[in-house]
Image (cartoon, grey):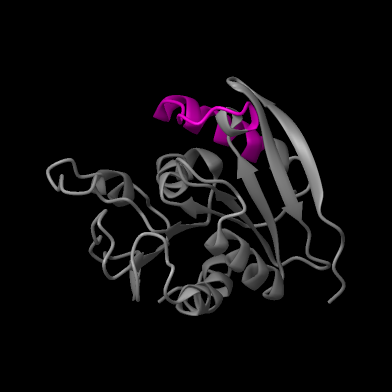
Amino acid sequence: MARRELSVAEIETPHGLARAHVHPAGDPVGALVLGHGANGGVAARDLVAVTEVARAEGFTVALVEQPYVVAGRRSPAPAHQLDAAWLAVVEHLRAGALAGLALVAGGRSAGARVACRTAAQAGAAAVLCLAFPVHPPGRPEKSRLDELDAVSVPVLVVQGERDAFGMPPPGPDRRVVTVPGTHSFSRDLGAVTEAVRGWLPQAVAGTVP
């Protein structure tokens, strides 16, 4: 399958310029849009690895940098700003590079939370969560499971078995794959990519068991 070249677009959002790194597939079967963690970027090892796996499965992949990152700020924006910027980027991409493709929304950590909160508005067919932060470390009473539970399409959560941010339970439309390591996936990136490889085609085909 022929691959086209990476393109980078700056996209106006209600909260400043975002940036999308679009890795096109030659004959795409779907689209995967991924957001970064709160203090990370789109060069995170797991995002890069998942991008390669998704492209090998025929997906066009867009890695999205939030406006606060593009502007060089270290502190994440409030959740409502992250969500609004994300939706503006998805709308832009769906009118252009991702037009007509079934969309899987996702991200790592804070990016996964954004994808969950906006899944319905974005028209996502499924959601991919890499290291979903169930609660702040040592604060299980500050649960964010409601964000996962609110998603009405199939969800894959890939979580380190020793993640200090907690372990989400599986649900009727939520598969949880536990891999060696912590929140950073530093021990076995191959287990992460294999979980994604097996799930992505099912997600867009509507055949997730």
Which percent across, then down, holds residue 63? 64, 50
Q: Residue at x 34, y 64 (%)?
A: 173
Depth check, front residue: 7 or 102: 7
As drawn, 188 above or below 9: below
Q: Residue at x 49, y 74 (%)?
A: 189
Task: Tell me if 196 is positioned left or right of 5 in this view.
Answer: left
Q: Residue at x 58, y 35 (%)?
A: 66
User: Can residue 92 be seen at all in this image of the molecule?
Assistant: yes
Depth check, front residue: 184 or 155: 184
Which percent across, then down, holds residue 99? 75, 48
Which percent across, then down, holds residue 131? 38, 58
As drawn, 180 above or below 99: below
Task: Tell me if 15 is positioned left or right of 141 in this view.
Answer: right
In this view, the residue farthest toward the left is: 141
In the picture, the quarter occupied by the C terminus is bottom left
Q: Quadrant of residue 188?
A: bottom left
As drawn, 117 above or below 106: above
Asked if residue 85 lies in the magenta stretch, the reply is yes
Q: Quadrant of residue 56?
A: bottom right
User: Can residue 98 be seen at all in this image of the molecule?
Assistant: no
In the picture, the quarter occupied by the N terminus is bottom right
Depth check, front residue: 101 or 41: 41
Asked if residue 67 lies in the magenta stretch, the reply is no
Task: Tell me if 28 is positioned left or right of 146 in this view.
Answer: right
Give the prevailing secondary structure in the magenta stretch: helix
Which span is picked out in magenta?
70-91
Depth check, front residue: 189 or 201: 189
Task: Tell me if 31 is positioned left or right of 204 in this view.
Answer: right
As drawn, 22 above or below 83: below
